[in-house]
Image (cartoon, coloured by chain):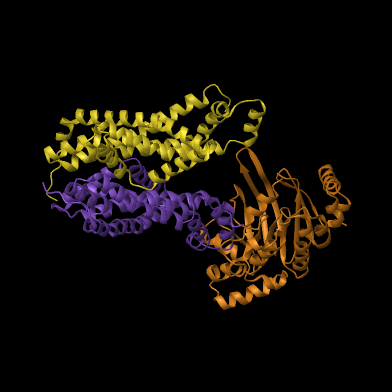
Chain colours: A yellow, B purple, C orange
Amino acid sequence: MNYVFQFNIVWDHFPELLEGALLTIQLSATAMALGLCLAIACAYGKSAGPRSVRVLVAAYIELIRNTPFLVQIFIFYFSLPMIGIRLSADTAALAAMTVNLGAYAAEIVRAGIEAIPQGQVEAARALGLKRLQIFRFIVIFPALKTVYPALASQFILLMLNSSVVSTISAVELTAITNSLSSTTFRSFEFYFVATGLYLAMSLGFRLALSGIYWTVFQRGRPA
Amino acid sequence: MMTRSFGTAEFLYLLKAVPWTLLLSLGALLGGGIVGLVVAILRTSPLPVLRWLATGYIELFQGTPVLMQLFVTYYGLAVVFNIQVDPWPAVLLAFTLYSGAFLGEIWRGSIQAIPRPQWEAAECLALSFPQQLWYVILPQAARISIPPTVGFAVQLIKSTSIAAIIGFVELTRAGQLMTDATFQPMVVYPIVAAALFPLMLALVLIGPDPRKAHRCHSWH
Amino acid sequence: MPLLALAGVSKRFGAHQALDRVSLAVDPGEVVAIIGRSGSGKSTLLRVINGLERPDSGTIAFDGKILAPTARQTRALRREIGIVFQSYNLFPHLSVERNITLGPTVAKGMTLPAAQELARRVLRMVDLEDKTLAYPQQLSGGQQQRVAIARALAMEPRLVLFDEITAALDPELIGEVVRVLDRLAEGGMTMVLVTHEMGFARRSADTILFMHQGRIWEQGPPAKLFGAPRTAELASFIDAILSVDPAAKRRAG
């Protein structure tokens, strides 16, 4: 092997890599928040809505889960302009990630909803609460607590998947690494370090999500 | 720029790329299966060093994007062999290692799901540890691991479309070429999605329904 | 010479002293029934004998040889000492016949046809000859437990341990298992059983061990132990067993 590793070039450009990481975190966090809302709405629709809503949501979920994320991104960025909706690369990326997470998280949240003992729902109904109120006050919080680990894994997956949006030139860590490696021809070193950054972000997100769990679900409550 | 209308010739070209996706996934699953078995056994090893090695490997491949793994493998191999490497071996290697990490976790979980009394009963029939694994534990663990393995296989087939990005000709990459030539992405990508959708559906229907996985756990 | 001899065996789990300097000797052909409340150390004693637990101190000697805790010796020991568990622990993915032939073929190098012949023989001993090709989940609890006994017998052990093998069975299925135990005892098998079946203990056991707080509290032939308990603990234990479960009272004669 006659290759000489030159990591100093990577350290010179490290601030740009960090900026990319920050953009990835921003993009992922926004998609997580929006996607979770979408997922909760879909889970509610699929478990408590009229038949038309249930079919629609089921079709949406199956469609997203059985097609590659790459294709979904391309449809948002390349196909939508054909019907007049022209999104910027970053917006298309956010939209695709939100829609993607929404489908996967909807199934997870629905599992949590179905894990709520039927007795609690019946008791609430006997107290005169309406369906939406029951959902909001009795069902959703414990449901989310139950499935939190599965949701957290899905979130991390989303963050890792964000690297694919580099293909439509949305600006995040992978895209920046791509351009840096092509201008300096030190591809291996840059991708190696970028991989390390992603690993750090994975661990960071896991810690942050644990912290959120603790503050939202466990502080001040009996275990 | 030449624009052609999207007709049967282009559709057949796209269709020819489908086998490549499947071939790549199959190769990665087989190779990853072997790697995964080793990883699962290392994870349950009494030696801490081996356990950490296996855990580190799993954390690495589960905590980084597939795209990055592909790039590092591709350029890493180019570095080691000092030539411009054909994408095919790099992609296959990367996906094999990736599959190995996930399958390893699935199988470790399956092995640990076998109740301790089964181990004890096998032990008390004077079977050695490898014999206990081979005759009693692994056959039961294998059944439990089928639904999540099928689920992962579906995921893998979807991920192989990412391979398009480093120049390997397969389904969505072929779609990209078609788009450039025909300027009709609205037609091409839904067709690509439609072509892959039945593949996924077929896999999910053939393999046991993951949500009914509990049926495979109880033998009663 | 005793077949099995324990001397000063102790075992503790965290703060709980499960066995406290236990010593006992089992002669060939002897049937020993161990009784006592839960937590008295009965199961731990059994598990220490066949190597599922390692004692903290004390020695175990089989056939005059003191055992060292190596894997090879433990495996050799398990060819001579069989065990039947409370929850039978049959292998669900194997047929009854394969459950029984697995040990002899894989651990003792028997040929499959010889092992199958042996399987038929032991199944006849437990009255389940017609269930050779069945799978465990197709059998009732009592039948599964009898298959578990057959599986242990197929190893042609010199001593068989039974860990409360009727405790998990529905009452109407206990009888068929106890009948097999009686038959084995009559046939001269060396048996050590942890049991609540006082009828069997009285009928077929040569020695009763009453355990309490990890120690052998009283020891002796059934007539003496049941007829004239020396300690208050044993007296109250016998009382408790016979008053709570009328079926057990009936089986205890």
For residue C184, what is the image quadrant? Answer: bottom right
Residue B160 x, y percent position in the rendering: 30, 51
Residue situated furthest top in the rendering: A220
Q: Classify A39 as above or below C206.
A: above
**C95 up-or-down from C37: above or below:** below
Residue B45 in sight here: no
| Residue at 86 percent of width and 52 percent of height | C249
Coordinates of residue A187 in the picture (x, y in percent): 17, 42
User: Which picture quadrant has residue B125?
Assistant: bottom right
Question: How many marks are shown on the rendered structure?
Answer: 0
Where is B60 relative to B137, above or below? above
In the drawing, does residue C87 fall left or right of residue B179?
Answer: right
Q: Nearer the viewer, residue A118 or B86?
A: A118
Give the image location of residue C19, x and y in percent: 67, 46
Q: The C terminus of chain A lies in which quarter of the figure?
A: top right
Residue drawn where x is 37% and y is 45% of the image:
B58
Q: Measured from the top left, where is residue C212 in percent x and y?
A: 75, 45
Front residue of A82 and A193: A82
Q: In the depicted view, which residue is nearer to us: C147 or C39?
A: C147
Q: Is residue A23 left or right of residue C127?
A: left
